[in-house]
Image (cartoon, grey):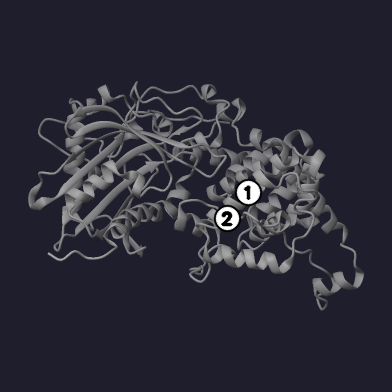
């Protein structure tokens, strides 16, 4: 069976069809693809074998997830008992219409991963990442790490510090067992457990009912069905636990021992129904003191599952030839940018013509303002909206805007040349090629949660400052360039579109609008729909606050 897209035609050409609202019509040319430009040549699926999940494009992730659901459903329906024996395999329900709390009173503990992602740009809070890093470098030789309990009062103090100083909490001078217990409590207190409330049962059932030779395939399919932020946080934790287990000759914590200690914090399952409904499960367990056979079976399966995840996490997060051979990836799903020399060929022009069309489209969007846009609640005092783009690519286009206490030319310079002042994830940046006074090929690298790979972007960008009323624009799009090779160990992200319009709004202030559509790789459209607008808003808020920091201090009299 080959996984395809619903209603998609065989022709790669047809999948680039552009909706009327997303085209620029000129007397000379046919419709212009405004929001991306990809190579048309198809990559053979087997050439992708050995690639990590985190390197796959948004479109490829969508195909892989559909295939994983088909494969896992077939396995579970064949080997799992039906409801007649007390358990029933059901498809995961990803869409839930339940009003969720806003978690404004919490920073770290009890906050869902998706909210942490929206707030900071990463699924795990900074202090939890710092705790894992500190334990990895300072405490892996501690006997019984995660098994020996910490001191309750000290753990509570650490949790309080994490809530109040999440961004800059350090663990020097702390006891390893206290920090390990704090980490364990963080995962235990997540509103949605790391393996999710729904898929926990699936992971457990795989190790209860599925034959050993099919378990690896089933587990990988289940991992692909996890929400992206859960899958990424799980990978970070599994890699850490594996590192701890490699020191088991010193710390006595084998992968199996770690699985015993951590499984209760990572899995969720419903308590077994009982004949005597008048006695609560908690009281009944106290009276008998012995878990029933079903509970024992679930506990063993959860242990075996986590043990496998720890030992084989690298292989499970790597895509093999077999699963990729069943995927038909169109050029749109492969999302390989065109070379600089080919950009604009669809317009019978060069890259200058393409960027001119991008600038024209940006100004048109600014004039039309609300047409086709769905507005969301503001985030960090930044307005957010999105629109669906009918060009065959699954990503939405996001628009964020706010006011900044700086004139347009200063703000333009901050965005172009001072990214290190507002992008906390920035690792490296350089100008690859200067094409014109106001056009260049630019490469930058941003960090991910370790050990996930860094994201590397190579973009063509141009800017204009001579627009009417003192406005400025920046337009960016990904290109391939021989002098901008992918950083070793990194993943090449794709900027389908990144466009800034900066306009003066009086008293030395500017209003900045950013349109963004970026494939950061390794994530499904669901991740972008839930979180990418918040991350764009976070960037604008940091640009805004970078000027506030500079403005602090004694005022000069004029």
Q: Is 37 left, or right, of 240 in this rendering? A: left
Query: Is the C-beta separation of discs 2 and 1 under 8 Å?
Result: yes
Which residue was labeled with disc 2? 170
- Tell me the crowding category of disc 2: few under 14, some 14 to 19, or many 20 or more residues within 10 angstroms, Cα based: some
Assign a secondary structure to mark 1.
helix
On the image, the x and y values in percent for residue 60 come to 48, 36
Residue occupying the far bottom of the picture: 278
Residue under label 1:
134
Name the quadrant of the N terminus.
top right
Q: Secondary structure at mark 2?
A: loop
Q: Quadrant of residue 52?
A: top right
Q: Residue furthest left?
A: 468
Give coordinates of residue 71: x percent, y percent. 63, 38
- 443 versus 412 height, above or below: above
Question: Measured along the vertical axis of the image, is residue 323 above or below residue 372?
Answer: above
- Note whether residue 209 is visible: no
Taking depth in this image into account, of 53 and 130 the one nearest to the observer is 130
**Residue 425, horizontal then vertical, whole percent:** 43, 45
- Quick check: 453 above or below 173? above
Pick the quarter of the image with the C terminus: bottom left
In the displayed structure image, the side of residue 221 where residue 328 appears, left or right: left
- Disc 1 crowd rating (10 Å Cα; few below 14, some 14-19, many 20+) is some
User: 527 or 378, which lies in front?
Assistant: 378
Residue 216, position as x, y percentages in the image? 70, 36
Q: How many marks?
A: 2
């Amino acid at each position: 069976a080959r996984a395809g897209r619903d209603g998609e035609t065989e022709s790669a050409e047809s999948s680039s069809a552009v909706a009327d609202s997303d085209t620029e019509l000129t007397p000379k040319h046919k419709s212009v693809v405004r929001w991306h430009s990809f190579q048309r040549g198809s990559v053979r699926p087997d050439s992708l074998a050995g690639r990590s999940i985190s390197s796959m494009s948004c479109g490829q992730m969508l195909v892989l997830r559909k295939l994983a659901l088909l494969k896992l459903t077939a396995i579970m329906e064949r080997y799992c008992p039906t409801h007649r024996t007390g358990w029933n395999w059901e498809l995961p329900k990803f869409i839930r219409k339940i009003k969720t709390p806003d978690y404004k009173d919490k920073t770290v503990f009890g906050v869902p991963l998706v909210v942490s992602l929206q707030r900071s740009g990463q699924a795990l809070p900074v202090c939890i990442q710092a705790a894992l890093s500190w334990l990895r470098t300072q405490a892996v030789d501690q006997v019984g790490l995660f098994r020996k309990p910490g001191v309750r009062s000290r753990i509570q103090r650490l949790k309080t510090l994490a809530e109040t100083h999440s961004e800059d909490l350090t663990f020097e001078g702390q006891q390893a067992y206290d920090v390990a217990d704090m980490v364990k409590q963080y995962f235990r207190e997540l509103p949605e457990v790391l393996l999710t409330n729904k898929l926990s049962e699936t992971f457990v059932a795989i190790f209860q009912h599925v034959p050993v030779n099919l378990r690896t395939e089933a587990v990988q399919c289940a991992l692909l069905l996890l929400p992206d932020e859960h899958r990424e946080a799980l990978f970070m934790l599994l890699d850490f636990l594996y590192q701890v287990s490699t020191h088991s000759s010193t710390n006595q914590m084998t992968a199996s021992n770690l699985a015993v200690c951590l499984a209760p914090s990572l899995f969720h399952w419903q308590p077994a129904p009982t004949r005597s409904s008048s006695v609560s499960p908690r009281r009944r367990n106290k009276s008998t003191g012995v878990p029933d056979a079903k509970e024992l079976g679930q506990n063993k399966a959860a242990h075996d599952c986590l043990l496998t995840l720890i030992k084989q996490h690298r292989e499970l997060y790597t895509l093999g030839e077999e699963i990729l051979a069943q995927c038909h990836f169109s050029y749109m799903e492969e999302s390989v940018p065109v070379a600089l020399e080919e950009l604009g060929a669809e317009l019978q022009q060069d890259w200058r013509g393409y960027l001119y069309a991008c600038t024209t489209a940006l100004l048109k969007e600014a004039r039309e303002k609300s047409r086709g846009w769905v507005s969301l609640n503001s985030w960090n005092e930044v307005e957010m909206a999105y629109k669906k783009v009918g060009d065959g690519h699954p990503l939405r286009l996001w628009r964020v805007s706010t006011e900044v206490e700086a004139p347009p030319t200063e703000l333009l310079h901050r965005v172009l040349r001072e990214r290190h002042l507002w992008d906390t994830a920035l690792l490296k940046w350089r100008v690859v090629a200067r094409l014109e006074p106001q056009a260049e090929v630019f490469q930058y690298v941003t960090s991910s949660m370790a050990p996930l790979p860094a994201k590397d972007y190579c973009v063509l960008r141009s800017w204009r400052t001579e627009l009417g009323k003192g406005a400025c624009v920046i337009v960016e799009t990904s290109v391939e360039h021989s002098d901008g090779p992918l950083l070793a160990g990194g993943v090449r992200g794709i900027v389908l579109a990144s466009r800034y319009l900066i306009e003066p709004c009086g008293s030395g202030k500017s209003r900045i609008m950013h349109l963004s559509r970026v494939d950061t790789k390794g994530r499904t459209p669901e991740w972008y729909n839930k979180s990418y607008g918040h991350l764009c808003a976070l960037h604008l808020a940091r640009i805004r606050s970078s000027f506030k920091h500079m403005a602090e201090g004694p005022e000069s009299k004029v």
